[in-house]
Image (cartoon, grey):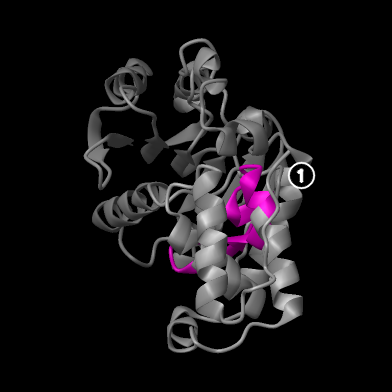
Amino acid sequence: MHTQLNWSDVKTIREAQMRASSFLREHGAKDPVFEAELLIRHCLDWDRTRFLISLQEPITHDVMERLDTLCQRRAQSEPLQYMFGSQEFYGRLFHVRPGVLIPRPETEILVEQILGLADKLWSHDEKLSVADIGTGSGAICITIASERPDWVVTTVDLSPDATEIARDNAKRLGATVRFLQGDLVEPLLAAGERVDILVSNPPYIPSRDVDELDEEVRVHEPRMALDGGEDGLVFYRRLCEALPQVTKPKAIVAFEVGIHQASDVADLMTGSGVIGEVQIINDLAGIERVVIGVRR
């Protein structure tokens, strides 16, 4: 049973932040002061500037009640993004809820690399076809469709929940995306479709490691979006086996990968027999995060 917060002597927003951060620290929060700030701002619907200039203002009983509820949920390791119902990605706010993986900042690198390389390989007026395999919240496909509105963007996911959430995000953000439900590239193969760009951020955590993840991820995020099979590479194998059938003679293939997987995934790409050039891109922490290949 988690300890209860005592709000009886709390009068100001600053005092509420201190009380909440102390509680969150006791329950293992990595950055309790900032998390307390985020929770209070969420309750008040304030930006950071408004919050910082209002620290000495009184806090109402209603806000403290809402803050108490959020603190108790956070003490159970519920992700802030699910509590708030959103996560920013590439400058856009995506709605998220249990059933989809929360978009990570590293995945923005995957999108950046695709857009940059496409600009080098094709003229700007070409109407390219893109397939994003594994829709999730729609962060990848919606961002690409928004950044390149002339492109034809398709996404595939096995999960009806994820597809529904991504559809809502696409509608709200004004992006035109075709949604298909199915297993990896199977709907594309069945229709005989080939694409200029194939992108995926598939589940890549080895099965045995999923149960060792932080409780915040392990308990709350969907296992099917995390578990990449015995060695974490099962989905990359299947995707790469399909590359000769699903990509055009000139194409980009781009994957996000987990730690220590980049060289294996690069080998799978070249092993497909159609990818001639492969590049590995590091994330901001210096971890090999994106493998991008070119067929031509």
Residue segment shown in magenta: 72-95
Instruction: Residue 174: give x, y in percent of width and height.
Output: 62, 72
* Mark 1 residue element: helix
- The image quadrant of residue 288 is top left
Residue 89 visible to the viewer: no
In this picture, is 259 found above or below 252? above
In this picture, is 46 found above or below 216? below
Residue 87 within the magenta-colored segment of the rendering: yes
Asked whether, in this view, residue 105 is left or right of residue 281, the answer is right
Instruction: Residue 183: give x, y in percent of width and height.
Output: 67, 28
- The residue sitting at 55% across, 64% down in the picture is 19
Few, some or many C-alpha atoms within 10 Å of disc 1 (few <14, some 14-19, many ≥20)? Answer: some
Name the foreground residue: 110 vs 48: 48
The residue at which mark 1 appears reads as: 161
Residue 272 within the magenta-colored segment of the rendering: no
In this picture, is 203 found above or below 47? above
- The residue sitting at 70% across, 62% down in the picture is 68
Name the foreground residue: 40 vs 198: 40
Q: Residue furthest front?
A: 9
Name the foreground residue: 160 vs 199: 160
Instruction: Residue 123: give x, y in percent of width and height.
Output: 30, 62
- The residue sitting at 24% across, 40% down in the picture is 282
- The residue sitting at 46% across, 23% down in the picture is 236
Q: Amino acid at mark 1?
A: Asp
Asked whether, in this view, residue 36 is left or right of residue 11, the answer is left
In this picture, is 134 found above or below 37? above
- The image quadrant of residue 162 is top right
Q: From the image, which quarter does the C terminus lie in?
A: top left
Name the foreground residue: 224 vs 186: 224
Q: From the image, which quarter does the N terminus lie in?
A: top right
